[in-house]
Structure formats: C-alpha cells, structure tokens
Image (spheres, grey):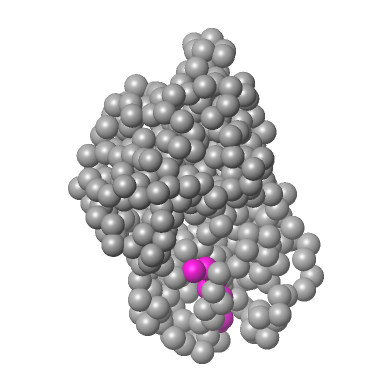
Amino acid sequence: MHERSITQSHAHHTSFRTADRTPLLVCFSHLRWDFVWQRPQHLLSRAARHYRVLMVEEPIFKPGIRPHIDVGVRPQGVTVAVPMLPEGMSHEEAIAGQRDLVEELIGRESAGPRVFWYYTPMALAFTSDLECDLCVYDNMDELSLFRGASQELLTLEEELFARCDLVFTGGMSLYEAKRGRHHSVHAFPSSIDFIHFSKARGVGRDPADQTGIPRPRLGFFGVVDERMDLDLLRQVADMRPDWQFVMIGPVVKIDPASLPRRSNIHWLGGRSYSELPEYLSGWDIGFMPFALNEATKFISPTKTPEFLAAGVPVISTAITDVVRPYGEKGLVEIAARADDVVQKAEEILRREKGPWLNKVDRHLSSGSWDKTWASMHKLMQGAMGDVPADRAGSSLSLYATTPAE
C-alpha cells in the first residue's frame, strides 16, 4: 500500500471533516478549474456563497511520486483538490488511490449537510460508498459521445441516474434526451454574465496581439477540439482572403498540425476569461464553426449568449441549442456551408446594428448565471427538505425548462 498524504494549508486540513454546520458541496469534475472559464466555474463560484465548495479534479500522474492530494483555494472561495498519483498504476489501482485520498480528505460519513455534485459519472467509481445528503448530476455535455469515451462511462452514468436526487442538463436538447431517465430532470441551458461581456461594447483599444490584424474580423473563442469544423473554417478563409479569422483557445484532443494555416487565420492560443471582452470588442462577427457530429449533438455553447452580450453578431452552424432559440428569434444567423457563411457575414457587415442589438438585450435580460444558480439552489433545498418540495418544484419547473434561460 502506498503512503498517502494531503498537501494543503493547515487552515483547510480538517475543515472538510469537522461538524461545521455550513453545508459542504463536493464537486467531481472532468474539467479543471484553471482551464477554460465555463459552466462549472460560473455555478460553483456562486455556490460558494452558500456552501463550503470543494472541487475534486481528475488525477495527475507523475513518475516516482507517492500518492497525495494537492489542495488550494481559488479567489472565488472554491477549494480545488487534485489527486497526484504515480505513473504506471493500473486503472484499478488509480481508482483505489483516488478513493483513499478523497475519503481521507472528506471522510466516509457526512458529519454535516453534504452535497455531491457530479460533472462526470466516472467519479462514481471511487465515491459510490461515501455518504451524502444530496446527490446532483449537472449533465452539461453528452460525454459518452466525445472522442475517447468508454463503455464504463455509460455504465457509471446509469448508476449515477439511479443514485442522484436531481439532474440538471446543460441544454434543451440534452434535457429532451434525458428527461425519461430520472424523475427530477431540469434544463438549465447556458446562461450569461452580462456585465462582464458587455464591457466589450465600450472597450476602445485592441490587445497587443490583435491590434495589427486588419478588419473585418471574424472571431472564435473556446476549446478547439473535435467539435470544430476545420474544413469549414478553411473554406471560408479561402473564399474571403481579405477577411481575418481570430481564433482564441487551447487545442485539445486533436493534432495541432491539423489546424488550417492561412495568412488570414490567426491562432492566438488560450486567453483568460478576464481578457475576452477586450478581444471581442475588436471583432465584427462571432464565428461558431461547429461540426455537426456526435460530439456536438447535445451541446449548448455558453459562448452564444456571451457573443451577444458583447454586442457581436454571430454566425453558427446548425447546433440544435443554437437554432432554438437564438436562430428562430433572429438573434444568430445559421449557416450550413461556406457560401452560406460568406453570404450571412456580408449581410451582417452591411446592416444597421441598433435594431438587432435592442432585440438581443430584451432576450438576454431574462437570464443570468445568478438566476440559474438561484433556481438550482431552490430545487436543491426542496430536495433536502429545507423548503417544501412541492413549492420549490412548482415555482421553478417552467423557468428551469424554458429555452430563454
């Protein structure tokens, strides 16, 4: 048996196992807190107002180390724990190692109110024997359709549905696909931090690495992976060599050599969440060239309302949760082929922006991450008996499943 330890500040060494009556929310995530700022960060930073929030990430393997867990506090009040395991472990040994480290950190039994919040069913493999007072599955993506997904993930998701008290989905199409698998499924599509992204409407200067790029500019921000239609991007760039394509985000799960290289395509790499409004302020059009494949079947891109809040018109491929409601309401242009993208872009560049922006703001006023979290929290309180369950459900069912949010 490997020796185990927890590397963390003394102030947090015992806080997750004491009888502190402040509820503990333990999130098990396949996404890292310090990667791209998206749904988990928006929700958990708000959850930290009501809970002691601990995010347990997937393990990192390094040669020659002893199993331990690195724990650190982020400025948003969320504590992030990363299991550190030696390279060469079998899958079964890695599961056992994570189980030991997590149990040592939070305890097998819940000393006070404790919520388990899952983003990945894979974490059930090492947490199924730990106690919690409420189990939530925030099903933000159909992970089974992503590249490299295993049969084990499908099996564990079935177990998670059987165990959890509440299921939240990251979009309407995912809600429609999952609502028959659990008695309490609620749709919470991508929301918006309007104040943050609307800063783009008033920024008057470009970041240094964008200032030399000519106009017009079509921009994308987010993870660059198998969900992007690189051929579409290549075709549009070739059709309009005088248009510039600014691509921001880390390249994941695909070979960087597969990225189209053109003088008018600018791969700038990842940028922080705080920097995004400065970049968006200099874009004429937001471009979402998602491939229509298994990995995008149920996605609800958070960047859709973020582009709109920034005042940037958007062209997207026909992702279901973009078509409904944004395409149907005339807030986003939907294009299938390169010539469609070019035609829509030319129309956007010619049109007056004011009427469209007024319509955008009316739509966005109905939703925010604050409202999304408040609705989720009421459902959680109802499920735990803190408020009457019938009142929590009846007051939120329509709000929680409407595409406007």
The image position of residue 42, as x and y in percent, is: 59, 45
- Rendered image quadrant of residue 14: top right
The image position of residue 368, as x and y in percent, is: 63, 40
Q: Residue furthest left?
A: 151
Near-viewer residue (114 or 134): 114
Image point (63%, 59%), residue name: 273
* Residue 276, placed above or below residue 369: below
- Rendered image quadrant of residue 36: bottom right
Kindly tell me whether residue 190 is visible in this rendering. Answer: no
- Main secondary-structure element of the magenta-colored stretch: strand
Count the numbered circles shown: 0
Image point (35%, 55%), residue name: 296
The image position of residue 405, as x and y in percent, is: 55, 38
* Residue 236, placed above or below residue 19: below
- Rendered image quadrant of residue 312: bottom right
Near-viewer residue (265 or 64): 64
The image position of residue 53, as x and y in percent, is: 58, 37
Kindly tell me whether residue 222 is visible in this rendering. Answer: yes
Q: Residue 289: within the magenta?
A: no
Image point (56%, 33%), residue name: 16
Q: Residue furthest bottom?
A: 263
Q: Residue 248: within the magenta?
A: yes
Near-viewer residue (301 or 25): 25
Near-viewer residue (357 or 269): 269
Residue span colored magenta: 243-250
Q: Is residue 82 left or right of residue 176?
A: right
* Residue 356, placed above or below residue 286: above
Image point (52%, 22%), residue name: 111
